[in-house]
Structures are given as structure tokens and as C-alpha cells.
Image (cartoon, grey):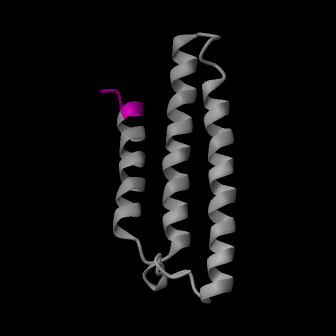
Amino acid sequence: MTSEQFAFCATFTLGLLGVTLHRYHLLSALLCLEGMMLSLFIAFSILTLQLNSTNASASPMILLAFSACEASAGLALLVATSRTHGTDHLQSLNLLQC
């Protein structure tokens, strides 16, 4: 395993660890998810540069587009949750309540 691969695996693992351990606020969970998506984007970009393949050159951009959609949906959910519940604490949310 090269040092680049180790760095990308470590950043993804740290983002995953942050999602599992910091489940108190919705904003911190969204930031950890964005860190994971950023590490995947950089890994895909480096992989396509190393392969010198034009077939796989669109995959990092598609991943970046999905990441932007995920971020906008997460922020919309954060705003809606803050307006209805007054806080972004994940423990105050009840999924069974209409």
C-alpha cells in the first residue's frame, strides 16, 4: 500500500468514525459525510490520472455531482429540522411522529 492509498483510506475511515461517534448534531454528521465524499473524489481523480484512461475520466465528476446533490438535500433537511424542532440534535427527532 502506497502512502497515497493509506492517506485516502485513513481519511475515509476518519470520516466514517466521525459519523459513528458524533451522532449528536445533524450538522456534524453532514460534515463527516462530506469529508468521506471528498476523500472518495480525490481517490477517483488520482486513479483516473494513473490509469490514463479516457473512459473513466467522467466518474470523478459524476461523483462530485452526486456529492453536491447530497449536500443540498442534507442542508435542506437541516433547515427543515431546525424550523420544526428548534434544534439539530438527532436524539430529539422522533421518526414515528407525524
Looking at this view, is 18 or 26 the one in front? 26
Is 41 left, or right, of 22 in this rendering? right
Q: Is residue 89 above or below residue 54?
A: below
How many numbered marks, from 0 up? 0
Looking at this view, is 10 or 80 the one in front? 80
Looking at this view, is 61 or 80 the one in front? 80
Residue at 65 percent of width and 85 percent of height: 84
Q: Is residue 21 above or below residue 73?
A: below
Where on the picture, by quarter, is residue 22?
A: bottom left
Residue at 54 percent of width and 62 percent of height: 31
Which percent across, then down, holds residue 93? 49, 81
Q: Is residue 78 above or below residue 89?
A: above
User: Looking at the figure, which quarter contains the N terminus?
Assistant: top left
Which percent across, then down, holds residue 72? 69, 58
Where on the picture, by quarter, is residue 74?
A: bottom right
Which percent across, then down, holds residue 19? 41, 62
The magenta region covers 1-5
Residue at 56 percent of width and 80 percent of height: 98
Tell me which secondary structure the magenta stretch mostly adopts: helix
Instruction: Residue lying at the far left in this picture: please name it.
Output: 1
Looking at this view, is 50 or 95 the one in front? 95
Which percent across, then down, holds residue 30? 54, 63
Residue at 46 percent of width and 81 percent of height: 94
Q: Please check the rendered image and state whether residue 75 is part of the magenta-colored stretch, yes or no.
A: no
Instruction: Residue lying at the far bottom in this picture: please name it.
Output: 86
